[in-house]
Image (cartoon, grey):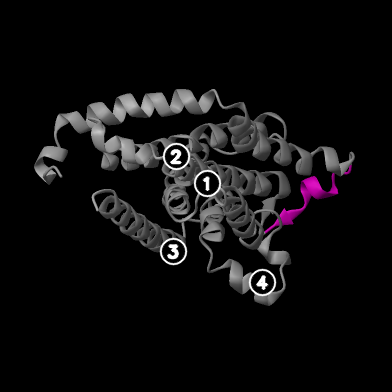
Amino acid sequence: MTTLTAYASPALATHLWNYGRFELRRLLRNRRYVAISIGFPVFFYLLYTGLLQGGNTNRDTALIDGIRWPAFFMVSMASFGAFAATLNWSRVIATERSSGWTRQLQAMPLDSRTYLLTKLVVSFVTTLPVLVLVMGAGLAVNHVSLPATTWVALFVALAVGSLPFAALGLLLGYILDGDSVQMGTSVTMFALAILGGMWAPVQSFPSIMADVARVLPSYHFSNLGWNMLAGRSIDPTDVAVLAAYGLVFGGLVIWRFVADEQRAHG
């Protein structure tokens, strides 16, 4: 094992850059991943704000917590797409662990810690095109009108807010195997989205379901954007809850990572 000082050398940045570029290129060649992680949120945003309305403008002008439906659902689908993109990395990690790829890293200059950090960074990067495309659809198709500063702040808030879900994606990849990861990730993803108010406003939930939503990270993630659209400042509770979940997920990832390392050297 290298020391912390050695690990924090310029070689780390080089390995991160080279391996990160490799992962991104490999990901962009995966048409299934691109279609599901990027195309799915955009398609459903356009479907539920346009095609399913059948020319009826009542829903278009309806207000949810003071926000027009196309803008409200834009944040919902941008949030969903961002965290879905990060969770989908669990499948890559579980498959590579099952195939023995991570054990092969022990004999390579790219050690397993750099592998883990690269996965986290690339997972975060994959949220960016989803946010751009969903928000772009809101602007171009549904004519969502916001000040330029609000567009930028919204993009940054949702990008940074996706970090706890990037950690959750890594965690699922470490606790599930190659056979169960697809089902486990899909159930987790849709449970968080539906119960967190991304597919239907929490305001329409029964009181018990609304209480459940408000303890989930998915609700607080979307609420970052909803508050901005309503002209409100970011709620510190949303930031605190997301940070707490990020610390818990990150701590569990480190625990599972160390356990895997110990078995590999066992």
Q: Is residue 157 left or right of residue 112?
A: right
Measured Cα–Cα span from mark 4 to mark 3: 18 Å
Mark 4 highlights which residue? 209
Residue 78 horizontal/vertical position (percent)? 59, 43
Mark sitting earlier along the chain (3/2): 2
- Give the residue type at disc 2: Ser
Mark sitting earlier along the chain (1/4): 1
Q: Are marks 1 and 2 in contact (CB under 8 Å)?
A: yes
Mark 1 highlights which residue? 178
Mark sitting earlier along the chain (2/4): 2
Mark sitting earlier along the chain (1/2): 2
| Residue stretch rendered in magenta on the structure | 56-64
Q: Quadrant of residue 204?
A: bottom right
Circle 1 SS class: loop
Q: Nearer the viewer, residue 168 or 232?
A: 168
Mark 3 residue crowding within 10 angstroms, few (<14) / some (14–19) / many (20+): some
Mark 3 highlights which residue? 241
Q: Are marks 4 and 3 in contact (CB under 8 Å)?
A: no
Question: Can residue 218 be found in the magenta stretch?
Answer: no
Q: Is residue 21 left or right of residue 151?
A: left
Measured Cα–Cα span from mark 3 to mark 2: 35 Å
- Give the residue type at disc 3: Val
Q: Nearer the viewer, residue 56 or 171?
A: 171
Query: Residue at 24% across / 53% down in the picture?
Result: 266
Q: Quadrant of residue 51?
A: top right
Mark 4 residue crowding within 10 angstroms, few (<14) / some (14–19) / many (20+): some
* Quarter of the image where the N terminus is located: top left
Disc assigned to residue 93: none
